[in-house]
Amino acid sequence: MAELNATISNLLNLAALIGVGLAALYFGFGGITYMTSGGSPMRAESGKKACFDALVGLGLVLSARVITSIIQGAIVR
């Protein structure tokens, strides 16, 4: 059981790392889009939406990690 627990924990850590990395890249893309909008309201709104979406995705990744660790802790007991 300890080996399975360690494997699941490693997979969750890897998934969280990938999710955080993708959110950071998307946030950077949104920031660059916003900064280079050149006064275009449509591009500025697109950049702001991308930044907001990246933050929501980051929140989902982190909350999923917390929820799965709580469930994993309850199963081990």
Image: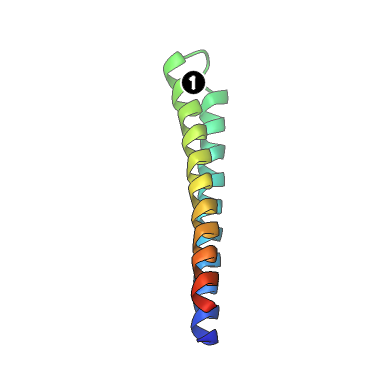
Q: Residue at x 46, y 37 (%)?
A: 53
Q: Residue at x 55, y 79 (%)?
A: 6
- Amino acid marked by disc 1: Ala
x, y percentage for residue 24? 57, 45
Q: Residue at x 53, y 46 (%)?
A: 58
Q: Look at the picture and state if 54 lies above or below 3.
A: above
Q: Look at the picture and state if 25 lies above or below 52.
A: below
Q: Look at the picture and state if 35 lies above or below 72.
A: above
Nearer the observer, 63 or 28: 63
Q: Residues within 10 Å of mark 1 (few under 14, many from 20)?
A: many
Q: Look at the picture and state if 63 lies above or below 4.
A: above
x, y percentage for residue 73? 55, 71
Nearer the observer, 73 or 36: 73
Assign the C terminus to one quadrant of the image. bottom right
x, y percentage for residue 66? 55, 58
Tag 1 residue = 44
Provide the secondary structure element on which disc 1 rests: helix
